[in-house]
Image: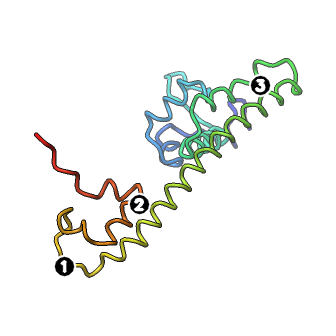
């Protein structure tokens, strides 16, 4: 690393970073505003990033795509400078990681429930393959498949609504 933290003296501009990590420039700037990364700048104010910065952005993007809240990442990013020892910092990081993991576990349970519902709907929907009737409540109410489909949450979105009394 050179004095600017750049690998082999090479710096990367924001447009290249955005392209490499798969987000917009404005997203990268927002991450900077949230102080997830501090950048070096040229005398003219152009941001320059090291390969380490690119790796950090890549990690941030992956975690955000996994629904880890930016506030949680910002809290992690500020642990080390606010602690006097590695011991204290490690316990704080561990606490943050545990909270993130618990939230992800809950999200996984929700996603698994939705996936199960979708699979059940798809399996039951096969009973409608080949049906020649128009798919409206009047035609489907007497069909056993319709009742089975409505046992899934997702098919309640597909099913036509009851007419209003207006």
First-in-chain label (2 vs 1): 1
Instruction: Answer few, some or many: residues within 10 Å of disc 2's Cα (few below 14, many 20 plus, some between 14 and 19).
Output: some
Q: Name the residue beneath numbered marker 2.
A: 151
Q: Name the residue beneath numbered marker 3.
A: 80
Q: Name the residue beneath numbered marker 1.
A: 132
First-in-chain label (1 vs 3): 3
Find residue 137 and report its horizontal and vertical position in percent. Answer: 21, 62
**Residue 95 falls in image quadrant:** top right
Instruction: Please name whichever residue, 19 or 58, is drawn nearer the observer in this view of the structure.
Output: 58
**Residue 2 falls in image quadrant:** top right
Question: What is the spatial separation of the Cα atoms under label 2 and label 1, in whole angstroms?
Answer: 23 Å
Q: How many marks?
A: 3
Residue at image x 81%, y 19%? 83
**Mark 3 secondary-structure assignment:** helix
**Residue 106 falls in image quadrant:** top right
Residue at image x 13%, y 42%? 165
Instruction: Answer few, some or many: residues within 10 Å of disc 1's Cα (few below 14, many 20 plus, some between 14 and 19).
Output: few
First-in-chain label (2 vs 3): 3
Extreme residue toward the left, this view: 166
Q: Quadrant of the N terminus?
A: top right
**Mark 1 secondary-structure assignment:** loop
Find residue 162 and report its horizontal and vertical position in percent. Answer: 21, 51
Number of the front mark, 1 or 3: 1
Residue at image x 54%, y 52%? 111
Does 7 appear above or below 3? below
Q: Do residues under tags 2 and 3 come within 8 Å of each other at their CB atoms?
A: no
Classify residue 79 as left or right of residue 62. Answer: right
Question: What is the spatial separation of the Cα atoms under label 1 and label 3, in whole angstroms?
Answer: 66 Å
Does 47 appear above or below 145? above
Instruction: Please name whichever residue, 138 or 121, is drawn nearer the observer in this view of the structure.
Output: 138
């Amino acid at each position: 690393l050179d004095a600017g933290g750049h690998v082999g003296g090479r710096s990367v501009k924001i447009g290249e970073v955005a392209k490499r990590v798969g987000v917009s420039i404005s997203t990268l700037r927002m991450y900077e505003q949230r102080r997830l990364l501090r950048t070096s700048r040229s005398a003219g104010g152009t941001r320059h990033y090291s390969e380490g910065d690119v790796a950090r952005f890549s990690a941030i993007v992956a975690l955000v795509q996994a629904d880890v809240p930016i506030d949680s990442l910002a809290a992690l990013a500020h642990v080390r400078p606010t602690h006097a020892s590695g011991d204290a910092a490690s316990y704080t990081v561990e606490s943050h990681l545990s909270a993130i993991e618990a939230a992800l576990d809950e999200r996984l349970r929700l996603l698994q429930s939705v996936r199960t519902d979708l699979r059940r709907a798809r399996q039951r929907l096969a009973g409608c393959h080949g049906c020649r009737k128009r798919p409206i409540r009047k035609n489907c109410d007497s069909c056993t498949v319709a009742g089975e489909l409505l046992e899934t949450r997702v098919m309640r979105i597909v099913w036509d609504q009851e007419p209003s009394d207006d």
